[in-house]
Image (cartoon, helix red, strand yellow):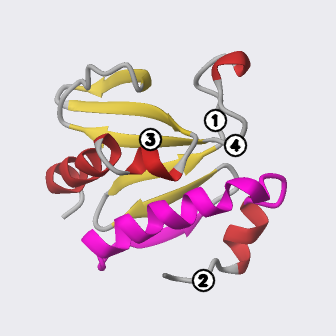
């Protein structure tokens, strides 16, 4: 597991309890896609190869009452609309390109749906 860099720690400064969720997600991303790069920006952390394939942020894509105590918004670029109760928002940004937002609140949520989505997103757009 990679140690969080200073930019990542600064990004999570007000959300330290959520950092383990990002660390678990990064293990999945870099184990499957070791060539992926990470860019920490003011409002999101972006993972890319040639193209962005996943972003992590604290964007509120659900009402506050519907959010777990510690949460991250996972944004994926997919070639299809995802029909799932886990999807908070989805938008077809142009034909054949869907931006899908999911709210993650626990490491256990990474196991099934999210990992399969990470497999689909880079295969379609990043690699």
Q: Helix, strand or loop at disc 3?
A: strand
Q: In this figure, which residue is indicated by the disc labeled 3?
A: 75
- In this view, 30 is above or below 109: below
Q: In this figure, which residue is indicated by the disc labeled 2?
A: 3
- Nearest the camera: 80 or 2? 2
The residues tagged by marks 2 and 4 sit, at their Cα atoms, a distance apart of 20 Å
- Nearest the camera: 109 or 99? 109
Residue 49 percent location from the top left of the image: 31, 68
Residue 10 sits in quarter: bottom right
The disc, 3 or 4, on the residue closer to the chain's N-terminal end is 4
Q: Helix, strand or loop at disc 2?
A: loop
Query: Could you tell whether 8 is left or right of 31 in the image?
Result: right
The residues tagged by marks 1 and 2 sit, at their Cα atoms, a distance apart of 24 Å
Residue 22 percent location from the top left of the image: 56, 60
Mark 1 touches mark 3? (CB < 8 Å): yes
Q: In this figure, which residue is indicated by the disc labeled 4?
A: 70
* Crowd rating for badge 1 (residues with CA inside 10 Å; few <14, some 14–19, many 20+): some
């Amino acid at each position: 597991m990679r140690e969080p860099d200073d930019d990542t720690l600064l990004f999570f400064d007000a959300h330290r309890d959520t950092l383990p969720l990002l660390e678990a997600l990064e293990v999945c991303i870099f184990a499957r896609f070791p060539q992926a790069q990470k860019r920490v920006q003011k409002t999101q952390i972006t993972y890319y190869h040639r193209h962005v394939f996943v972003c992590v942020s604290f964007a509120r894509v659900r009402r506050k009452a519907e959010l777990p105590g510690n949460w991250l918004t996972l944004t994926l670029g997919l070639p299809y609309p995802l029909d799932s109760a886990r999807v908070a928002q989805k938008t077809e940004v142009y034909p054949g390109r869907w931006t899908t937002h999911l709210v993650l609140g626990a490491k256990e949520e990474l196991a099934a749906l999210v990992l399969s989505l990470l497999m689909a997103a880079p295969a379609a757009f990043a690699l």
